[in-house]
Image (cartoon, helix red, strand yellow):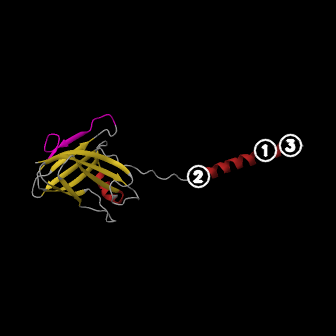
Amino acid sequence: MNTQNHLVTRWLSRFFLGSFLLATLLLVSCGDDPEPANEEELITTLTLTLTPTGGDPITMTFKDLDGDGAGVPQYIYSTGGDAAVLSASTTYTAEITLLNESVNPAENITEEIEEEADEHLFCFTVGGGANIDYSYADEDDNGLDVGLTTIWETGAASTGTITIVLRHQPGTKTGACPGSGETDIEVTFNVAIQ
């Protein structure tokens, strides 16, 4: 009788232990798979190159090598000083280059934006009285503006700013600024038209 009770107890122990392990496996395997995170680009450097027809290019560069760290961002103008000096009544082709210089070698983020053009939109805001008009010169596969290339037309002498915002809009891009999504980078440059 004692042996019979011992066998029943062993069988019940194994049964409950097996049931517990099976239930644990089912709970782990049937859980919802997490959505892959929408990986944001780390952009440390934005350069805007303005090339007039038949003239020398002018560059404006923003660098923030430590991202959200305590380091002070740098603004570098190829014309010197604290503003990009543009010629009045001139048409420029403007091209944006983006880098992640926190890694070595630097990562070219521009290529990633080109590949994911249907998820990205550059928005431009002219401020402070700068006499500049701009128009988009590129578009994604859906016919919506991107902004890696734009055409700028300067008017009379003036000073002000141009703010560039890169919006990341996976699945929600409509071509309207600022639209939905997140801001990948926002930079304001000083400009002087002479």
**Secondary element type, mark 2:** loop
The image position of residue 146, as x and y in percent, is 29, 58
**Secondary element type, mark 3:** helix
In the rendered image, the quadrant that contains the N terminus is: top right
- In the rendered structure, does residue 73 fall within the stretch colored magenta? yes
In the rendered structure, find residue 122 and report the number of the disc placed on it: none
Q: CA distance from mark 1 to mark 3?
A: 11 Å
**Label located before the other in sequence (2 or 1):** 1
The image position of residue 57, as x and y in percent, is 14, 52
In the rendered structure, find residue 31 and report the number of the disc placed on it: 2
Q: Which residue has dot 3 on it?
A: 3
Side (left or right) of 92 relative to 38: left
Q: What residue type is disc 1 on? A: Arg
The quarter holding residue 2 reads top right
Q: CA distance from mark 2 to mark 3?
A: 42 Å
Prevailing SS of the magenta stretch: loop
**Label located before the other in sequence (2 or 3):** 3
The quarter holding residue 154 reads bottom left
In the rendered structure, find residue 10 and report the number of the disc placed on it: 1
Q: Residue at x 31, y 38 (%)?
A: 66
Q: Residue at x 34, y 58 (%)?
A: 116
Kindly indicate whether the residue at mark 3 contacts the one at mark 2 (C-beta within 8 angstroms). no
**Secondary element type, mark 1:** helix
Q: Is residue 74 visible?
A: yes
Towards the viewer: 127 or 163: 127
Q: What residue type is disc 3 on? A: Thr
Towards the viewer: 77 or 160: 160
Furthest residue to the top?
70
Residue extent of the magenta highlight: 69-85
- In the rendered structure, does residue 160 fall within the stretch colored magenta? no
The image position of residue 41, as x and y in percent, is 35, 49
